[in-house]
């Protein structure tokens, strides 16, 4: 029988490709009527790029994204705090890619349609509920394309990868309420502008309460020498700040964010100019949810942001969803299309992702920026007078181990899904 996957985002599509590679039948059900390349830039870390490479998508990633060479932290004065190589430049066997989220989703979407067939993704179907049947599960959908009071589809397992506003999670936890806001607002956009620093550098400047992040997401240059630069301008307010937190994806006004960064003109990047070059800017509250004590209920489970929504710190959201997909596939290979497979998947992934959610609330590896702000708010002459090299390296190394992309561990561990492994063998 078929695995029913709810949601055609990055997690759901990666799950479909992974299960199909292992010979497990599956279908994807998506609420919207038409899947479009939405969003802005994201980073796909080496541990996730490894999984996408093993799914046969290495060339598509290389042609679409930018292989990140360096991550650099700066103070609000534009002074370099810390920089480290990334991806292949750091000795990983796989790159790190900066890429438009919508482009990545379309790569996955196209691969699902090509490999599983055009009927594998069913749009216009919103999950209304599910129930177990003898040996399986029955999902009920509503939407423009469902008939009567709803369409029912039967399968062996149900995997809910329907995002931070997951209908499945809301059914399981009806008293949970909206996502938790930490007081930060993110203004996000892309600008056509010249490359900066190495041309493949991702930068973070500022501190916990005011931050700017940017990186290139297009490997190509236009005739004028410009390329697409993704940026995030962040400001953290007091918890009682009056903000319309119920709006999750709204067009922003320049007056809301531009004044905070008026003086952020560095000799290596003019941030006000970059902001002014953006055609459209969107604002998002920085939100997550508390880790759950349980994802799996019989023949259904949660995956990706439905299971472990986290702050966008450490570039981990999409990458962790891809790891979910691969561990779930391995569990099905080991245990069949059974509740035991979902239990094994959860036993691996729920504790690991809960640690990342909580670490991101503590500012993750970006805490070094706040340490500099606290110790040297007026700037510094030598970073060694503010932070020791041991403090810097410990902050970066500890987070990599926690998030599963410690270089040596990743380079030497066996594949999550063994090459050539097929369901039923």
Image: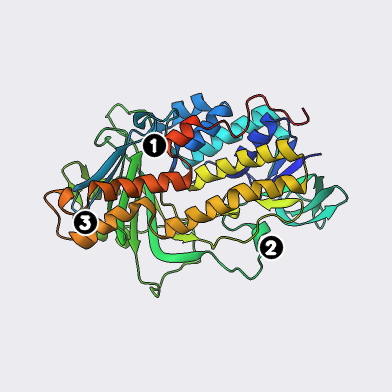
Q: Residue at x 16, y 43 (%)?
A: 267
Q: Which residue is mark 3?
A: 262
What crowding class fits label 2: few (fewer than 14 Cα within 10 Å), some (14-19), or many (20 or more)?
Answer: some
- Mark positioned earlier in the residue sequence (2 or 1): 2
Is disc 3 placed on a helix, strand or loop?
loop
Residue 425: x and y, percent?
77, 27
* Closer to the camera in the image, 43 or 189: 43
Asked if residue 96 lies left or right of residue 57, the reply is left
* Closer to the camera in the image, 34 or 130: 130
Q: Is residue 46 above or below residue 346?
A: above
What crowding class fits label 3: few (fewer than 14 Cα within 10 Å), some (14-19), or many (20 or more)?
Answer: few
Residue lying at the far right in this picture: please name it: 134
Q: Is residue 252 above or below residue 243?
A: above
Q: Nearer the viewer, mark 2 or mark 1?
A: 2
Q: Which residue is mark 2?
A: 172
Q: Residue at x 35, y 59 (%)?
A: 253
3D distance between C-alphas at marks 2 and 3: 46 Å
Asked if residue 328 lies left or right of residue 309, the reply is right
Give the colouring mode of the picture.
rainbow
* Closer to the camera in the image, 221 or 45: 45
Q: Is residue 107 above or below residue 174?
A: above
Residue 14 picture quarter: top right
Q: Nearer the viewer, mark 2 or mark 3?
A: 2
Q: Nearer the viewer, mark 1 or mark 3?
A: 1
- Mark positioned earlier in the residue sequence (2 or 3): 2
- Mark positioned earlier in the residue sequence (1 or 3): 1
3D distance between C-alphas at marks 2 and 1: 37 Å
Residue 38: x and y, percent?
51, 45
């Amino acid at each position: 029988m078929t695995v029913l996957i709810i949601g055609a985002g990055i997690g759901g599509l990666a799950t479909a490709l992974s299960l199909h590679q292992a010979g497990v039948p599956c279908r994807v059900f998506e609420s919207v009527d038409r899947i479009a390349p939405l969003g802005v830039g994201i980073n796909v870390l080496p541990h996730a790029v490894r999984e996408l490479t093993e799914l046969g998508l290495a060339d598509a990633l290389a042609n679409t994204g930018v292989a990140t060479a360096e991550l650099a932290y700066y103070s609000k004065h534009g002074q370099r705090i810390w920089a480290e190589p990334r991806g292949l430049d750091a000795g990983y066997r796989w790159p790190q890619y900066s890429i438009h989220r919508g482009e990545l989703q379309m790569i996955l979407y196209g691969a699902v349609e090509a490999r599983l067939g055009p009927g594998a993704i069913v749009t216009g179907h919103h999950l209304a509920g599910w129930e177990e049947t003898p040996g399986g599960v029955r999902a009920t959908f509503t939407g423009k394309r469902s008939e009567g009071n709803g369409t029912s589809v039967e399968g062996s397992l149900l995997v809910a990868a329907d995002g931070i506003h997951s209908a499945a999670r809301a059914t399981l936890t009806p008293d949970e309420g909206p996502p938790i806001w930490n007081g930060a607002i993110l203004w996000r956009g892309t600008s056509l502008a010249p490359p900066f620093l190495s041309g493949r550098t991702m930068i973070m400047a500022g501190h916990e309460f005011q931050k700017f992040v940017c990186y290139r997401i297009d490997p190509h240059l236009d005739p004028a020498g410009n390329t697409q630069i993704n940026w995030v301008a962040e400001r953290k307010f007091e918890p009682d700040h009056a903000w319309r937190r119920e709006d999750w994806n709204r067009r922003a006004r320049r007056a809301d964010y531009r004044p905070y960064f008026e003086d952020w003109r560095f000799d290596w990047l003019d941030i006000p100019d970059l902001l002014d070059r953006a055609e459209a800017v969107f604002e998002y509250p920085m939100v997550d949810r508390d880790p759950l004590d349980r994802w799996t209920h019989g023949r259904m489970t949660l995956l990706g942001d439905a299971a472990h929504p986290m702050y966008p710190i450490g570039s981990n959201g999409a990458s962790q969803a891809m790891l979910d997909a691969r561990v779930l596939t391995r569990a099905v290979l080991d245990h069949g299309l059974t509740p035991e497979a979902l239990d094994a998947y959860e036993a691996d992934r729920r504790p690991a992702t809960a640690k990342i959610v909580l670490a991101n609330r503590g500012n993750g590896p970006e805490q070094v920026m706040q340490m500099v702000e606290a110790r040297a708010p007026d700037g510094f002459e030598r970073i060694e007078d503010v932070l020791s090299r041991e403090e810097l390296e410990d902050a970066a190394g500890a987070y990599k181990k926690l998030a599963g992309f410690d270089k040596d561990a990743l380079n030497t561990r066996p594949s999550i899904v063994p090459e050539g492994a097929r369901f039923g063998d």
